[in-house]
Amino acid sequence: MDSMNQDGNDRDNKIYPPRRKADAKRAFPRRRQDALKWNGWGYKDSAFRINQNDCVEYTGDRYSISGYEFPGLRKWMVDRCGLSLDDKTFSQDVPKDDDLPRIILNHDFMDELRAACMIFSMDSQDRLFRAHGHTLAELYQLRHGQFKRIPDVVVWPENHNDVEKIVQLAAKYNVCIIPFGGGTTVSGAVLCPENENRMILSLDTSEMDRILWIDPENFLAHVECGIIGQDLERQLAEYGFCTGHEPDSMEFSSLGGWVATRSSGMKKNKYGNIEDMLVRVRMVTAKGTMEKSCQVPRMSTGPDIHHFILGSEGTLGVITEVTLKICPLPKCKKFGSVIFPKFEDGVEFLKEIAAKRMAPASIRLMDNDQFQFGRNLRPPKNSIFATLADKIKTLYVVNFKGFDPNSLCLVTIVFEASEEEVALQQKNIYSIASKYGGLNAGEESGQAGYMLTFSIAYLRDIGFDYSYIAESFETTLPWDKVLDACRNVKHVLHQKCKEYGVQSEPFATTRVTQVYDTGACVYFYFGFRSVGLEDPVKIYESIEHSARNEILACGGSLSHHHGVGKIRKHWLPQTVSTVGLQAVRAIKKELDPDNIFGCQNLFSKL
């Protein structure tokens, strides 16, 4: 039955997909640890490792690079990143029950939870898996330390009504709830506060993964919050639609998490960010369900309640159902790439593309370090970057000697539209690129660069194996500050590494990932060899803290799409103003006076 049926639409116009069968394909099972790494990123069967041939290989068969060896990658890791194969370190084993924090039990709550026939678990591994996200500090803690506080129980609601019942019980018995979607957060958002003395319930939304209906006439889909990105796109495609929302984490992140953190996707130029796609949302708070009465393109009804549901990061309630705009599957999808003599040329190119509103579905600029990394992340045959490397070599030696292989940069492009629109976009973009010295580097390189996004997250784990720690962080900057910020932040990262006694040159690189009329999203990738450092995570966090201060000094945002969580809330008052934060606290105090949603994201106290 349609649980949001106040819209007045004719139900006959909608498609109601059948319930998922028990054996249906999905991103991962309820027991996530059966398919996913307990102390790293992604699937157990997919990993970079150094094999018996002393060569880096990528295991499994899920990705385009799976099953290949990468002869150049090992040398690049040693020469460029300073990694030493003599620094082999090992993760501790999966903790045993006695090694984990004891359960704080609220007997009356558990009695009523059982009476309500909710699915729940107090298994130690279920609890541990939902005690963390994927920040550097959290994964390092899993490998070498211990969490002081983890959830006491994991509960799996199966629909909106279940969530209402769980929240009502939690409010009745003063139990703390931390919503848990895909678990991909890199802001510390699902960490249990160490000072929380109440029973902590991890509300895992993964069983709420249904597309409740599709409305082809109005281009809408009504979906439960726990569906994972790859499952959502695959199921919509069966009916000829897509959302087009592809954050880097889409294989594992959930729809509810996208809304709760104000997510952005790689193809936002065509499909928008999550706030652009959102038509209606239901959120269960400690005082009841919050929702609008209809699902229309726009409303003028005072302050928009969606604006404080978006980005609420689990502090106000549980997002249960979302109505999204959907699009017909694109008739034509093509990849492209352009090389520029230097990073500055690439930035100017992107700026003009944005100003003329000509951006294709996705357009991303990587600096020279990332380009060199991509060249080395290639198997000896069917090389994903071989064509580009050969082109550059020929162009550089024969015709374009002004291209220095050590300073050039690469733009990767995704076109999605009709055949005619794609052809026009290609013509316009490559024409503008030529103004800034850009050269068409081909479709294969663009596809390789785009797909690299889904495997690059696995690289951090092999770094951990050899005493190398790395992380990424992002911001939004005005166009006139992009180059200054990239230069200044890299300088801060290098300078601070020297001050802390890091033994080899750090890896500090940038990528421009999303463009807007007035600015761009910029990613920084940063890593260093941690041998000889007493507390490498603390040093990393201190260095990133300095880098974040420099970003803010350059006029950048606290975050473009990763959110605030716990690790960035220090800067929130200066970011949104003290009065602004007081307004957010006032909403929290009104909706959740007993702090049932006590994750302590955004701020620590009411």
Image: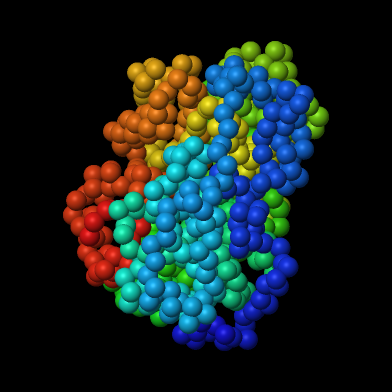
Q: Is residue 202 above or below residue 523?
A: below
Q: Can residue 240 be seen by looking at this rendering? A: no
Looking at the picture, tell me which residue is in the foreground, 152 or 312.
152
Q: Is residue 246 above or below residue 40?
A: below
Looking at the picture, tell me which residue is in the foreground, 48 or 536.
536
Looking at the picture, tell me which residue is in the foreground, 116 or 324.
116
The quadrant in which the N terminus is found is: bottom right
Residue at image point 26% right, 50% down? 576
Instruction: Residue 517: give x, y in percent of width and height.
Output: 43, 45
Looking at the picture, tell me which residue is in the foreground, 381 or 49.
49
Residue at image point 72% right, 13% down? 398
Q: Can residue 502 be seen by looking at this rendering? A: yes
Instruction: Residue 457: give x, y in percent of width and height.
Output: 58, 40
Instruction: Residue 292: give x, y in percent of width and height.
Output: 39, 76
The quadrant in which the C terminus is found is: bottom left
User: Which quadrant would residue 13 be assigned to in this image?
Assistant: bottom right
Residue at image point 72% right, 67% down? 24
Q: In this view, does 606 lie above or below 106?
A: above
Q: Is residue 180 above or below residue 59?
A: below
**Colour scheme:** rainbow
| Left or right position of 483 against 571 | right
- Looking at the rendered structure, the number of numbered marks drawn on it comes to 0
Instruction: Residue 448: give x, y in percent of width and height.
Output: 68, 37
Residue at image point 28% right, 47% down? 572
